[in-house]
Image (cartoon, coloured by chain):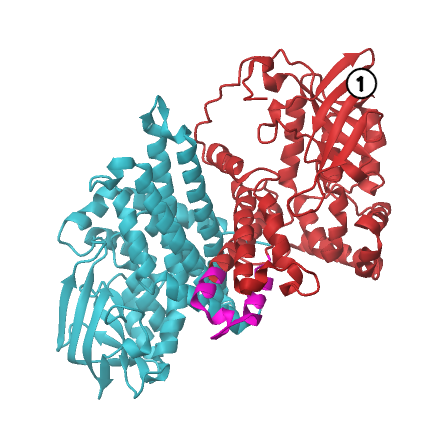
Amino acid sequence: MNFEFSDEQKFIKETAQNFLADKCSSTEVRKILDGDDPYHAELWAAVAEMGWMGTVIPEEYDGLGLGYLELCVIAEELGRAVAPIPFSSTVYLFTEAILTAGSEDQKKKYLPKVAAGELIGALAMSEGAGAVTPKSISTSVSGGKISGTKVPVVDGDVADFVVVTAKTGAGNDEGSISTFIVDMKGDGITVETVSTIDPTRSHATITFDGADAEPLGDTGEGWHIIDRVFDRAAVLFSFEQMGGSQAALDMAKAYAMDRYAFGRPIASFQAIKHKLADMYVATELARSNCYYGAWALSTDAPELGVAAATARVSASEAYAHTSKENIQTHGGMGFTWEFDCHLHYRRSKVLGLTIGSLPRWKDRLIDRLEARNVAA
Amino acid sequence: MDFNDTPEEAVFREDCRTWLDANRIEGWEDRIGRDTGGMVLSKEWQKKKYDAGWACLHWPTEYGGRGSTAIERVIWSQEEGKIGSLSGLFIIGQGMCAPTVMSHGSDESKASMVPRIASGEDIWCQLFSEPSAGSDLAGLRTKAVKDGDEWVINGQKIWTSGAQHSDYGMIITRTDPTVAKHKGLTMFYLRMDTPGVEVKPIKQLNGNTEFNEVYFTDVRIPDSQRLGDVGNGWMVSLTTLMNERLAVGGGFPTNFEDMFQYAKTVEDDKGPAIQNDVVRERLADWYVASAGLRNTGYRLTSALSRGEAPGPEASISKLVLGVNRQNMASFMLDLQDTYGVLTDKGIAAAEGEYQAIFFRAAAHRIEGGTDEILRNIIGERVLGLPADVRVDKNIPFTDIPTGNK
């Protein structure tokens, strides 16, 4: 059995960790938290030079031609560093949509630009509060023109191209939805940045008014395309969440070791000790579930549907738990703007919501287990 | 990442499979019901394996093993399958007592005792915990006093699994109460039929009697049955407890699948319980924990396959299993609704299985290391947090406060 990353993959992880420790310290993250820039342009350029955006893009499209295991370890490090860049939108969502459903021409058109770091991509689904379902989508396409409003779109204000789900058929079932690619430089597009719980990841409202829409995949296939993209993205996001969870645990431990009360480090009190032990257990279970997701993703295993949902639920809950208990461990200082605890508290919630919330994914997990009829 | 054997592992697996297919006892499952306590069948299977060189694989050949690696033990266990449950009778003897004898016993003790543990001829129990010493094992009080070439033991042990059918027991005693508690302990082994040893079963909250109290009244044993130096008992016991942790099978199975299937069969007014959102969420949570344990087992097996020692993540399994099993059994009773109170074999839902787990699971969080101790161990040994403040560390044992007793 070889349920572990290879030495080469571990080296990529180590390199990524050192690179981000240098170029994405909390000082850098706070520039985006506090300032007006939607993302850290310098960091994005440095990441582009590393070629990370093209990790899974085949060499024929100018990518690195590596695999999902390599992308997973990079994702983990980006999560640990709370990186304020549009990496996930471009790589886990936009690129996966092109790889999953794009024509050969579309792959040739978009993938090399992504690999070169010259294209920021995004995915637009949600239109209002509540779960995204075929019924909740009113944005529609007719005669190659798209109209409607999408909100919130992660990186919607900086994306060059956006994959959009829109109605193309009558009724409210899955077959009424198709996916399209929209060039954000086109006419009939209004973008408005919106404020969110995590200012280190910009979000926007995009209003389409008869803008050009390029079909991605067959008509009526949109829901299934997004389903497959979300499974793949779920695994990649879960690595970010797991990396963030570990960072929150490390931060809590470091604080508890140094902070004295009643004559000794608070880390020596059982209430804190047990709290950190629980954070460790949650993060390790998530790590194991992430690994299985990585295996399923990298081998295109039939188990991917269950593995992805399991990884997402596990990592979302771990990160939610550790980020809030990290604040708790810090006492009053944990509630300040100045301390970094809230960077994780914010990011953990955004990652937990971005491709669908926990209740939806737990439901999805049971659906998949029922479909398999046998849970392993 | 893959789930394949290395070429060497594949060869070993084939060897195991060949022997097992030819020698596995036919119809063994039918014989269990007729066999009192499962002992005859268990001993028969163990002897068969021993005679062919397939017992206690990782032990040296001179004691009946074949010097196998940890991953080979995992592979054997996978191939042996369900009949491996017959080894339950020997877990304490083979898993904990024999390694201790091999590390600390005299040459005569090793030669005379260990092969008989491997073959299943002798069953051993572990005489560690006492009424005043569970989590705080070093606080034990059973005394051993030297008298010529013998030691005289007085005291009481508790929670001793299998004492009622054990041939031998490994016992840790206090030989010097005037020094600090960890320094005055000595380990011995003895025959359970030695005069003065009295085994009394304890009725558990589920009505079963797996555990016992064992009373020692002027029990005399020869010094040749000492394991390790006088006063070195604590170090010897750490060998025993460490081996407990190394008993890995490559996974920590849960009964999620049974519960999942059960939720499909029991109904409410809207249809099968599995369509209920509350039920779906609870099942999803249990699945994610179960998968996490299974996948942690894969990481563990992977490390063994590379010849590495199990990592610290191995310590999380008991903690996760215990509380989840208790909560999920309770939830299964919730699904049965009012009917969930029934334990009557003929009419109870799911043959009363979840009612049984509901009770037995209460002990999972206590036996073999309580949840609280495990959290302390994770905190201190895995995360490196400072140790608890100890008020009993460097004072004579006789000066340690004990409460009302």
Residue B277 falls within the magenta-colored stretch = yes
Answer yes or no: is residue A233 visible: no
Which residue is pictured at 32% across the width and 57% down the height? A351
Which tint was used for chain A? cyan
- Horizontal and vertical percent position of residue A210: 16, 82
Judged from the image, the secondary structure of the residue bearing numbered disc 1 is helix
- Horizontal and vertical percent position of residue B362: 58, 46
Which residue is pictured at 72% across the width and 21% down the height? B228
Q: Is residue A222 above or below residue A256?
A: below
- Horizontal and vertical percent position of residue A181: 26, 76
Residue of label 1: B223
Chain letter of the residue carrying label 1: B
Amino acid type indicated by mark 1: Asp
Q: Give the chain coloured red.
A: B
Answer yes or no: is residue A112 visible: yes
Which corner quadrant of the image does residue A130 belong to? Answer: bottom left
Q: Which residues are magenta?
A: B255-283
